[in-house]
Image: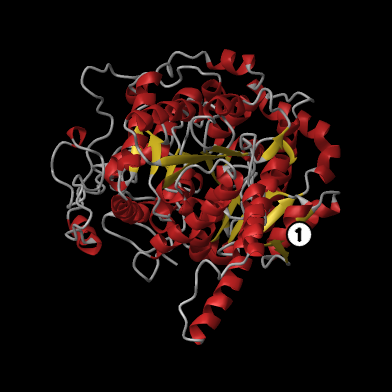
Amino acid sequence: MRLSRSLSISSLSGLPLWKEESLPVQDLLLFEVSWEVTNKVGGIYTVIQTKAKITVDEWGENYIMMGPYYEHNFKTQVEKCEPPNQAIKAAMDSLINNGSQVHFGRWLIEGSPYVILFDIGAAAWNLDRWKGDLWNACSIGLPYHDREANDSLIFGSLVAWFFKELTDQLQDKPNVIAHFHEWQAGTGLLLSHFRKIPLATIFTTHATLLGRYLCAGNADFYNNLDKFNIDREAGERQIYHRYCLERAAVHCAHVFTTVSQITAVEANHMLHRQPDVVTPNGLNVRKFSAMHEFQNLHSMNKAKIQEFVRGHFYGHLDFDLEKTLFFFIAGRYEFSNKGADLFLESLSRLNYLLRVHKSDVTVVVFFIMPAKTNNFNVESLKGQAVRKQLWDTAQFVKEKFGKRLYESLLRGEIPDMSKILDRDDFTIMKRAIYGTQRHSLPPVTTHNMLDDSTDPILMKVCSLLCLMPIVFHPEFLSSTSPLLPMDYEEFVRGCHLGVFPSYYEPWGYTPGECTVMGIPSVTTNLSGFGCFMEEHVSDPSEYGIYIVDRRFRSADESCNQLTQFMFSFCQQSRRQRIIQRNRTERLSDLLDWRYLGRFYMYARHLALSRSFPSEFKMDHLNIAPVSPTQGFRYPRPSSVPPSPSASLHSTPHHSDEEDDDTYDEEEEAERDRQNIKAPFTLGAEPEGKSKQPLENGK
């Protein structure tokens, strides 16, 4: 099944045009190999899970995912079944008959793709032999104490063994495409290459190993890309063997891809190979049939968050929840890479601005970053119990009040409001009020932290708690939680602003998810998402995408810019925030897999043409792999005055008139669609800035 096309989307920047678009999928098998198949660890899980549907739509039963076997994940996420392809079954049986355990089934996600899962623990007895095979193949040795690297070798050896058995069964038909994600799966590609297994291979790096380590160590990474001694840096961080596995997989693949242009430049310096194509990360975008239904979802979920806040801050609820904004940061717990350090410093400055301007707006900040905990915080649980008790008391009194009022009206009397509640009712209410008294500050975190004395977020938050309400939730959100019973999607929809000022973010799913749900967000020009939006949106801030400059500015300047973004957002009226959410949600088409999946289609075409050149030829109009091509660019919203944005207040409306009904969402959206235009060329730096290694690639 071919993907639906759009004239604009089909010419997204970075995607060469090729004449032949459809592959004979009936004569091919596509395998996607990742450590995160059915195994949620990080952002790659979201990539492969959300992309599954459009890939299954195109490939049907000829698409199979491969990953490690974990019993709990298999029992809760996979429906066990028999392989429909006899060659796959024979290859699995060969591994099983030789002492390995291999499991097959359908992953119960949208699209229901087939999965093959390899039991690493059951094959660990082969580890020493496979270490010798790896050394003989490419002279890479793995230390015994690095369990993750050892597990990746076992996994890769099982994958390569499976492909050897499979291709022996298939002979030449059908041909096989194997797409590997990240270094943990790259060992399988590496061994398949040295054993000359006939595969068309693709390797995608979502973030280079060394890049992540260097940025976490507070290195001035992007300004010194061409100055690092790569081997020495990897050796000093004791990841040289992992780096070698990653770099070898990159150079052995027929096609090498990354998820963003900024990661492509990084990979060129860190791994010494220019990516063949950039494959941006997408999402499954569901449009609501009713206009502005996502606005209703925002109101419903905001009410749930307000209930949590009432309980968590009981006894100190001295702010108006109707004038309260909810900001949040979420993702892997990498304090500096994810920008938590910059966010915390900006919150301190934001608090100062709100006090100086005597603003009646309160900002409640959530940190959703999983860390090591042992249980829920007792004070947090008590707060929700107190809130519930107060609610039950109010409902009890209300019921009695309503019954007496009803009976009084039936008698044709106007009730005496001083007598309709008796002394017992007042006693119950007073006891409820006294029960909400609290002499200690609200808890900083919802859980008991194992390393609370050294946790960087806690150390900084404790000094800010007296200034603004902050909640650190060191666990993934779940609708079954007794504290904050909401899934992540519900929580995001209920917030007002997501803040993700990352220093190292190869793509950035968190601001992307906010965009799809119509929630404004802050990102940076060092994230793949931020660069993508700068390329395709003329004025991102008017669409609720605030991009902090962490590339050309100092840390203090970036912090001030982030503070100003948040302060400007706090100054918006409710109507202005609604208008901005409408515009944010309108950008969701940019992130739809139905469009961005074309980059993966191109990568498969290219891999087949390089691995089986006699059978697959690729005629394309532009062979330059990552060069900019004509694409499209969202214009500045038509209702925003065409003045320089730097001189204006950054809100959807610059007027304070709340009753202005001139704004029409449908009319503005239609005008913007008609005015979509080709993007400007990327890479131009501000005046006075010297050329950075990031742009010239040298």
Q: Give the image quarter of residue 690.
A: top left
- Residue at 55% of width from left, 74% of height from top? 402
Q: Amino acid at mark 1?
A: Lys
In the image, residue 132 above or below residue 410 = above
Q: Give the image quarter of residue 97.
A: bottom right
Q: Which residue is mark 1?
A: 75
Q: Is residue 478 visible?
A: no
- Residue at 23% of width from left, 54% of height from top? 658
Numbered disc 1: secondary structure: helix
Q: Where is residue 99 drawn, in percent x and y?
A: 86, 49
- Residue at 20% of width from left, 21% of height from top? 687
Q: Where is residue 220 drawn, in percent x and y?
A: 45, 17
Q: Give the image quarter of residue 21.
A: bottom left
Number of residues whose C-alpha sits closer than 10 Å to that of mark 1, classed few (under 14), some (14–19) or many (20 or more): few
Side (left or right) of 47 relative to 449 = left
In the image, residue 248 above or below residue 308 = above
Side (left or right) of 53 relative to 689 = right
Relative to the observer, which residue lies in front, 573 or 78? 573
Which quadrant of the figure contains the C terminus?
top left
Q: Where is residue 545 drawn, in percent x and y?
A: 34, 43
Side (left or right) of 414 relative to 177 = left
